[in-house]
Every structure is written in C-alpha cells, then in structure tokens.
Image (cartoon, rainbow, N blue to C red):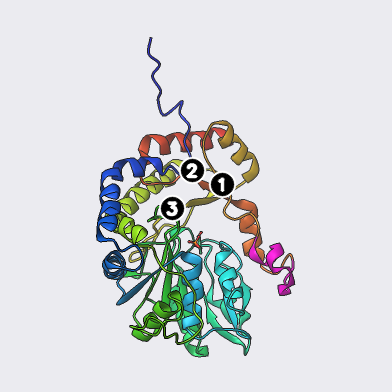
Amino acid sequence: MTKTTTAAQTKIPLLDLKEQYGALREELLEAARRVMDSGVVITGPENKAFEAEFAAAMGAKHCVGVSNGTDAIELSLKACGVGPGDEVVVPAFTFIATASAVSTIGAKPVFADVDFKTFTLTPEALEKALTPKTKAVVPVHLFGWPADMDALLAVAAKKGLKVVEDCAQAHGALYKGKSIGALGDAGTFSFYPSKNMGALGDAGAVVTNDEALASRVRSIRDAGRAPGERYLHAFPGRNARLDELQAAFLRVKLKRLAAWNESREAVAKIYRRELAGLPVTLPPEPKAGLRHVYHLFVLRAERRDALSRHLSRADIGNAVYYPVALHLQPAFKDAGFKEGSFPVSEQACREVLALPMYPELGAERALRVAQEIRRFYA
Ligand SMILES: Cc1ncc(COP(=O)(O)O)c(C=O)c1O
C-alpha cells in the first residue's frame, strides 16, 4: 500500500527556499549562462540592468548594487559623511548588522527604544537619544512593517540628521502609499537568501534620490575609484561590489517580488483570522496606504517558550527574532547601557515568536500552524 502524506503529517519549516529554487530553476540557470556568455563577471551589464530595475521598483532615482545588506548600511553612512566621533541612533531591537555597520566605520551606535506594537523606532525615543554628536539615524522597517517615517524625518530635519532606512526586511513595503527606501537620504537592502527577495548567496543594494550620494557609494564599493577611473582613487574605499551572477539572479527574482509579497499577505490573513481571540498579540492591521510585507510573521505570545517547544514537537518551524536586545549584546557591553535601559525592546525579546512564513507556504499549512497554536492554548 502506498503511504500518502498530508499537510497534517508533514514537517512545516519556518522557511523553505527549495520550493522557490525549484520553480525558478530554468530561469536562474539561463541567467547564469547569460553571465558566462558575456564574459563579464564583475560590475557589468547585469549590474547596470538590475540597478535600473530595482531603483524603478523601489520608486528611487538611483540604485547601487553592493555585496550585502550590512555593507549597504556602512557605505550609505560613510557616503553621508558619518565617521569617527559621530553618533548614529539605531533601534535596540533589530538584527545586529544595523548597529555593527555603524561601529565598523568608527562611529558610535546609540540605541533607542521601539514601539510596542510595530517594533520600530519611535520619534520620542529618537529625540531622547540625541546629543550634540548625533549625525544620523537608521530606522529599521522591522519584519516588513514600515517605521513611522514622517515623524522620524521631522525630528531628523529639525536636528539636521542624515536618515538611512534599513530596508533589509521590507522589500516592497509601502508607507503612506510610497515605497520605503528613498524616503530619507538613502535606503539599504539585503538580498540574503531568506529575505523577501533573496540572492543565491550574499548581496545588497543602496537606493537614493541623491545623485551625488549614489556616486559616492559607487566609488566606496569599488576601491574608492574616482568615476570612470581605473587606477586613480579618490579616497581609501572598499571592495563591496555586487557580483554579476547575483545581479542576474536578482533580476529573475525581482519579477516575482510583488506576487510573493501578496502570497505572504494571504498567509498573514489566515494567521490573523485563525489566531484571533488567543492570548497572543498579532501584528497591527495595516492602515490605508501602509503595506506590511511580512518578511516574518511575529506575534507576542503568553508562555512563549512553552509554545515554541509545543510547535517544535509538532514539527512546525518557529524562531525568536530576537532573543537579546542590542544594548545587552556582549558586542556592545561598553556602550553604557544596562538591563532596563530599553524596556519595550527587552519585553519584545521575552515575548516574540515568528511563525512559518514564505510565499509558497499556502493555506493548508498555515491552517495547520494555527490549529497547533489553538491546541496549545486550549
Ligand atoms: C534588519 C537587518 N539589517 C541588516 C541586515 C544585514 O544584511 P546582510 O545579512 O545582507 O549583511 C539584515 C540581514 O540579516 C537585517 O535583517
């Protein structure tokens, strides 16, 4: 007798990239062939085409492909003139790269608390973190939810701060009907494979409406070369270029981004409907003009760790993003903060849990995830 497997018996991972790679296999192979046939594997026609296509998709005038999302932040801040002696305000609740990119250019990350519901930097927390040394702020559109940019930009404008949006988790998100990314001075993207739009390896991009800033980022990513020069270097730069191969793969992926984000929204809708009434706090409903792209579906849960264990036993992927706030990380132990400095971020670390979320997840699997959560709280 053949054994049939159903969604009720199969493992549901937090994220499954193999389904996506399978569906795109021929197009990705064709993209790789195109690069090999061109004979150009570093900053050639694929970079140029990808940069134009991604800038248009993100509603920005310019895009510069770079090596990863961390470098995108580092290069953007550097191009904004941030350096040693400067302070940059970053949320205490985010992936560490937001802050480490500040440290690696010799500036000081200064942490600030986030909003209880959206997990994004609040304008009040930004104001509180300002000192005469503050040069820039990096709001993060965490989990795919756009930060309150108008309010943050107003504070930044009052103090003359540069604004670099960390869009690593928010490809395609909208704030008041506009794409995130070019709302401030620059927006930085990661194409780490698990992101809403991922490369087949590491990759990143900077978008901006500022031509001079784009040109500085272009120069920094390429050994500090002056525009059009080969062995004339305007300043000591980096090697932080985007590979042609990754640019070619990303062009294939970009065509799917809108549909993938819609599939994520459909999964989120099921979670919202099926989890209503349980002792969990769901992400807020997006208001008109705001688009949450659900890089992760993160809820706050009562008895979070027990729920996590229950889901794992039922073969359902789940994870805590993030278990330790940045001001309490060993990496920033000398930054002058302590437990209690940012209570909302610290509470989030104790309560958040991410559920399976990827475009191919589908209704059947999402329903099973919700059913297991209901069973846990029954
Ligand atoms: C919020 C945030 N910022 C920055 C990064 C850094 O991106 P990358 O891993 O491509 O360097 C990530 C990626 O993990 C991220 O989630």
In whole angstroms, how far apart are the C-alphas of marks 2 and 1?
8 Å
**Which residue is tagged 3?**
193
Q: Secondary structure at mark 2?
A: loop
Q: Which comes before the other along the chain, label 3 or label 1? A: 3
Residue behind mark 2? 14
Q: Is the residue under label 1 in contact with that under label 3 (CB below 8 Å)?
A: no
What residue sits 38% from the left and 45% below the top?
267
Amino acid beneath label 3: Pro
In the image shown, does 288 or 159 lie closer to the viewer?
A: 159
Q: Work out which quarter of the rendered image holds the C terminus and state it.
A: top right
Task: Tell whether label 2 touches label 3 (CB within 8 Å).
Answer: no
Asked if the residue at tag 1 contacts the one at tag 2, i.e. Cβ–Cβ closer than 8 Å, the answer is yes
The residue that appears at 49% across and 62% down in the rendered structure is 142
Chain part drawn in magenta: 325-338
Identify the residue at the far top of this view: 1
Q: Is mark 3 within 8 Å of ligand 1?
A: no
Q: Earlier in the sequence, mark 2 or mark 1?
A: 2
Q: Is residue 337 magenta?
A: yes
Relative vertical location of residue 252 with respect to residue 288 in this rendering, above or below: above
Residue 53 vertical position relative to residue 9 in the rendered view, above or below: below
| Amino acid type, residue under disc 2 in the picture | Leu
